[in-house]
Image (cartoon, helix red, strand yellow):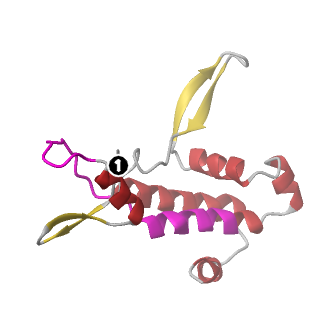
Amino acid sequence: MEILLLNTPEGLKPCYDRDYDEKKKLVLGKMYKAKITEPRNVGFNNKYFKMIDLAWEYQNEKVCEHFKNDVKRFRKTVEVAAGHCDTVFNLRTKEWVDVPKSISFEEMDEFQFRELYDKVKNVLFTVFLRDIKVEEFERFLNF
């Protein structure tokens, strides 16, 4: 079970309805072990995916076809280019290939995710958005 809690003077309180519902499942008087971590910024996570989606919208038909019209493949390719990957051996092709690492909340803390954001943004503007001004792009990103 994983729930988001807010630390208050009265103690830890569930943040959302789903967290409250999960907490209700715990037996009163029974001891539980918890690992306390600070969750990644959900708003910044959404901004990351908005950046990817917006960069995808700027691509021409040829680029989109290259990625089989799949923004998820585009995102993973950019993440690999940003260095967020592992190298594995593909038995079918008999060669080493880079595969993107997970960007899930459990796999990355806030600092790591912000670092990835900056590296991905750099790849986007170096490779895919060369003719777009960063200020123009960010105006749409923050809108």
Which stretch did the figure color magenta?
26-54
Name the amino acid type tagged 1: Glu
Quadrant of the image containing the N terminus: top left
Q: Is residue 63 left or right of residue 6?
A: right
The residue lying at 54 percent from left, 64 percent from top is: 48
In the figure, residue 107 lies in which quadrant? top left
The residue lying at 82 percent from left, 52 percent from top is: 69
Residue 75: x and y, percent? 64, 52
* Viewer-nearest residue: 112 or 10: 10
* Viewer-nearest residue: 42 or 100: 42
In the figure, residue 23 lies in which quadrant? bottom left
Can see residue 129?
Answer: no
Residue 16: x and y, percent? 38, 66
The residue lying at 60 percent from left, 77 percent from top is: 141
Q: Is residue 29 above or below residue 61?
A: above
Residue 116: x and y, percent? 47, 55
Residue on which disc 1 sits: 2
Residue 135: x and y, percent? 60, 82
